[in-house]
Amino acid sequence: MIGRYKLGKIEIKNLIYKYKQFDNEKNALENINLTIDKGEFIAVVGLNGSGKSTLARQLNGLLLPTKGVCIVDGMDTRNEATIWQVRQKVGMVFQNPDNQIIAAIVEDDVAFGPENLGIVPQEIKKRVTESLRAVGMEKKRKFAPHLLSGGQKQLIAIAGVLAMRTDYLVLDEPTAMLDPSGREAVLKAVREIHEKYGITIILITHFMNEAIMADRIIVMHMGKIAVDGSPRQVFSDAVKVKRLGLEMPLAAQIAHRLRLKGMDIANDIYSTDELIENLKVN
Ligand SMILES: Nc1ncnc2c1ncn2[C@@H]1O[C@H](COP(=O)(O)OP(=O)(O)OP(=O)(O)O)[C@@H](O)[C@H]1O
Ligand SMILES: [Mg+2]
């Protein structure tokens, strides 16, 4: 424990955030209270402008609370003395694959973070190899990033975060600009690094099929947390889901239509796997 806050979690208390450019406008985040425990896999969903990216940027101090606090493993993001450590703990991957790669060779790009931390070259080499392996990109080590696909660039960006050995990985719509195969590859890598390395995942997405991969879904609505629960809890209330501007996961939509056609399908079908299992039983 450091002060009142426990180590090993992100705690947001009574957080309000207002973009200063718009003095008369509403707050982008309105009294957020949220605890993210180490090892969780959380999806954040919600309409455009609901505050998802603003929330993500609070987690590593890219934005600082207007009121309230964000505490990362005991460190207040407003404290300049520890912001560097906060940034090492919470890695970010953004939507646009082309904005995140800086070096001319893949391995140099992945090495960039640890180099900035002053880590010795031998250790950097080890980390680069490990990180590229973790996302299945070892073979592209010597490639020029601009020759890679969007999905592969996102994998390199994730490897760059892994090489910093961050505990938390925040991904802000990492698949939004990718084709289906790139999307699949990125999601697979995210799932694997969560399972293998226990890295805490905070995945912002517009795709409900991605959100149901998480253990917990946070639904943002007009700067507030509207719902916070397991995928099952969140999607059990289809009317509320619609009211929050979201779609049901594809499998749930199909299950609903099959039910209307008179098929005997269970009520709580959310993932494709569940639907397939249910159809087998039928
Ligand atoms: N740089 C900015 N300056 C001023 N207002 C901003 C800025 N970025 C976001 N906002 C406003 O803050 C609110 C929350 O925006 P935010 O980008 O966090 O939403 P979001 O849920 O990530 O949306 P999207 O799904 O479109 O990415 C919106 O009203 C938005 O217009
Ligand atoms: Mg956003």
Image (tube, rainbow, N blue to C red):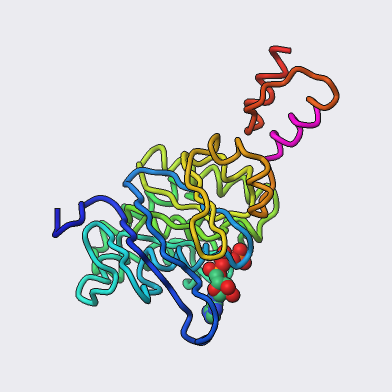
| Residue shown at the point (64%, 50%) measured from the top left | 207
Left/right of residue 262 with respect to residue 269 in the rendered view: right
Q: Position of residue 88 (x, y in %)?
A: 30, 63
- Which residues are the magenta region? 249-258
Q: Position of residue 6 (x, y in %)?
A: 20, 52
Please name the residue shown 43% across and 68% down the image: 57
Q: Nearer the viewer, residue 61 or 131?
A: 61
Q: Main secondary structure of the magenta part?
A: helix
Instruction: Evaluate whether residue 95 shows in this view.
Output: no
Give residue 198's quadrant in the image.
top left
Is residue 277 visible in the rendered image? The answer is yes
Is 173 drawn above or below residue 17 in the view shown? above
> Which residue is drawn at the image coordinates 68% and 26% (left, top)?
275
Residue 54 on image: x %, y %:
48, 68
Residue 272, placed above or below residue 179: above
- Quadrant holding the C terminus: top right
For this rendering, which residue is in front, 246 or 251? 246
Q: Is residue 257 magenta?
A: yes
Locate residue 38 relative to residue 56 in the image: left or right. Answer: left
Q: Is residue 271 magenta?
A: no
Q: Which residue is found at the position 50% from the left and 87% from the top?
A: 23
Residue reaching furthest to the top: 281
Count of numbered circles in the view: 0
Residue 86 lies in quadrant: bottom left
x and y, in percent, of residue 58 in the image:
40, 67
Residue farthest right in this picture: 261
State left or right for residue 104 relative to residue 10.
right
